[in-house]
Amino acid sequence: MDSKTPGTDCKKMEMTTKVKTIAVYMLGVLVLMMSSSFFHVLLRPLSQPRIIAESCVGLFFSNLPFIRKALTLDVQRTLSYLSDFIMICHMFIVGLEMDRYTFVRLQIREAKVASAGVLTTFIITYFAMPLLHVSNVPSTKSNLSLSVILSGTASSLLTRLITDLKIGKSDIGKFVVSAGVQSDLISMILISIGFILFDPFDHYNTRKLEKMVIMSSALVVETLAAAKLTPVVMTWVNHENPEGKPMKGSHLVLSIAYVVFICSLSPIAGQFNKVLSAFLAGFVMPREGRMAKMMVSKARYFFTVLFYPIFFFWVGTEAELTKLGAGHIMTWARLFFLFLIVTVGKVAGTLVSGVMLGFHWPESVAIGLLLSIKGHFQVYLAIVAANEGFISISTGIVMVFVTIFTIIYTPLVVAKIIERARKRSPTQRMALQWLSPSNELRIMLCLHGPENVQAAINFMEISRGPAEPGIMVYVTDMIELTDKIAATLAHGEGVDAVTVTDAAVIEMREKITNAVQDHLVENGEGINHRRMLSLSTMNGMHQDLCILAEDLLVSLIILPFHKDQEEDGRLSGGHSGFRNVNRKVLRHAPCSVGILIDRGLGSIETSRSFVSLNAAVIFIGGKDDREALAYSGRVARHPGVKLTVIRFLLDANSDSVSSRVSRSKANTAEHEEEMKLDDEYFAEFYDRHVAGGHVSYMEKYLVNSGQTFSTLRSLEGQYGFFVVGRGGRVNSVLTVGMNDWEECPELGPIGDILLASDISSAASILVIQQHSLKGELHGVHDEFNVM
């Protein structure tokens, strides 16, 4: 007889249904996360931030018909609770990232611009709201509330956009970030005061005096506890958990519980708004110490990966696009005029204050447009207002779209700022050929990882030249900014104070640093070095490197080849991302560029007491070959390097067709001038190095590019290091047609031939391109001034 009862079967079926439901929800969250990341990758060429991808994906998925049918009341309620929790955490981190001494160390110019922008936007919004019929409960108090909300700035989002778009170190970048923080603080403080005075959930009626006193008292107690008690608690936690050691689980739980307790004081004791309470608590809390940095970095990771996609999905479930009312002209009027109000209001304020402060009007307009940016908090308030009936669902959706539009145009504004800065940039030729012998040579030596270290060390060694003035080497790590690394960045004081906390990156950088320092301790005479970091997406890394090179005033950037040598001597398939970075740097660099192909350079042991490296420089002619010769002059001074200069010359006695064509082209003024520069510079090099016996010299008389190829093949096994120019040759018959079979155009014809596996697998190659002056620099100094 079966002992099972119908009740037991029902419970099992109910449990199975719940498990299936949870699995479906988890799958949905995973799809949201993956879709947001994928769409963000698609938008990267347009420099659009991740919030655009998250909002588009969230609105799209939440408005699919089959998903809306699956949204039960319980699901909607759960999403609402989640969104409240996400916004509380978001606003706490926003407050924590701000400097609590902002009003104590007030920056007058930024304060004037921020106040003017808030004031003009407030005034314009206040008088325009009744005309647009935005509020369902029109009154002076509701208009005041909407005006204050639209006058604010999403300073946290603005700071990250300014940093990601590479103008964070410029005068206008620093100014906008500071003004944005003050604008955000002004609006948040006004919103908090308004919440104490008026009850938005009771038709904005004025609260009773007793209620105001209780709420204000609770907020004061919370603020004092956050400002005075927090340093004591966090100092003890930081002392018990020093840097470099794992955080104790009990202390981590205690710290989080303490933060939750502080943020809950005013909502529980005085019924103050929980989101505003979290912001104010975060703002007055000290952000120094390990615990605060850990909270920010971990929270940012969860926001990026999980919370923000869920948040915008909730926004989409509340903002049903079918209720937008796209067929009504008033909907589009609201969209247009609300966007116009929030942008024109800020621009008007910054223009007026800019005139008083002596700013150029284009910069004032740019500042106003950047300060108009809205973010997650404004989206949250728009949806809450629609749910509470203060505004219609259509108006709430319009406000969400207005928020998105204020973010979309930001990269265009920054591009115009950089364009104006580029036009003002001073022009000077940054190349080894033009470097004065009395000046220190500055090299930016880039590395992909520890696999490039030994080759980089030997490159520094053979490039050192005389001890006076010596060389300055900026050893720069090229690290791709992935979503994982971006989520673990710790933002400190200032817009550009970013610390990489990813364990793998830290370990890799320490290995490189230790290897370089160990070498320089014993062989560091004449070599100064500094560690640098290029942390960027593959799409923007070339810009990061170019800006860094111009900032450091380097004459030569050395990039690792995108392929590494394997154990059998052959080159690997390589990294296509780094290959594109190399190509873009060659196009946009503000100085000369070299690509270093390591095929044994890292395995030799350089010595100053005996010859350990046979090197050759190939000179055919042109500006890049002259730059290669200029670099070789430094290599020639190293006692451990035996250098040979091989000059390829056209055989003037040949009667071949190619020779006759070459002689006819040589009559052109451009070619004659180039040949004159080649002869003059080579004669100078010969007198300085060859005549004194420091450098060997040989000439090869050739007829065409076929002989050039065969001559290069004949050099196999004779040299361990080649220095060649990338191109820049004028009508040279000795290389004509070689471009047709190039596998790596970034190396030029000679470098590409030397790279061929059937010629040599044991010869490293340095391909150099001289800096070309084209009237304007392609890059721009990252600390440029336009104000």
Image: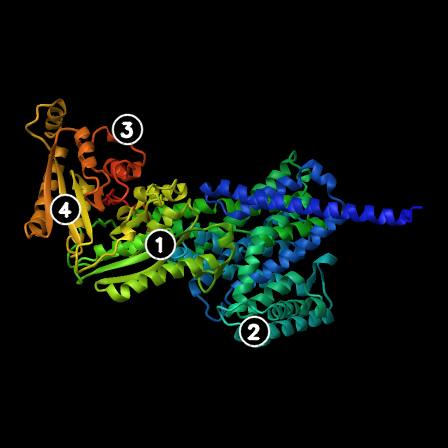
Left or right position of 55 against 748: right
The numbered mark, 2 or 4, whose residue comes first in the sequence reads 2
Total marks shown come to: 4
> In the rendered image, which residue does mark 3 sit on?
740
Q: Nearer the viewer, mark 1 or mark 3?
A: 3
Label 4 CA crowd tier, 10 Å (few <14, some 14–19, many 20+): many
Q: Residue at x 13, y 33 (%)?
A: 671
The C terminus sits in image quarter: bottom left
Q: Return the residue nearer the eye: 632 or 610.
A: 610
Q: What's the amino acid at mark 2?
A: Val
Q: What's the amino acid at mark 1?
A: Asp
> In the rendered image, which residue does mark 1 sit on?
782
* Helix, strand or loop under label 1: loop
Q: Is any atom of residue 125 visible in this view?
A: no
Q: What's the amino acid at mark 3?
A: Asp
The numbered mark, 2 or 1, whose residue comes first in the sequence reads 2
> In the rendered image, which residue does mark 2 sit on?
237
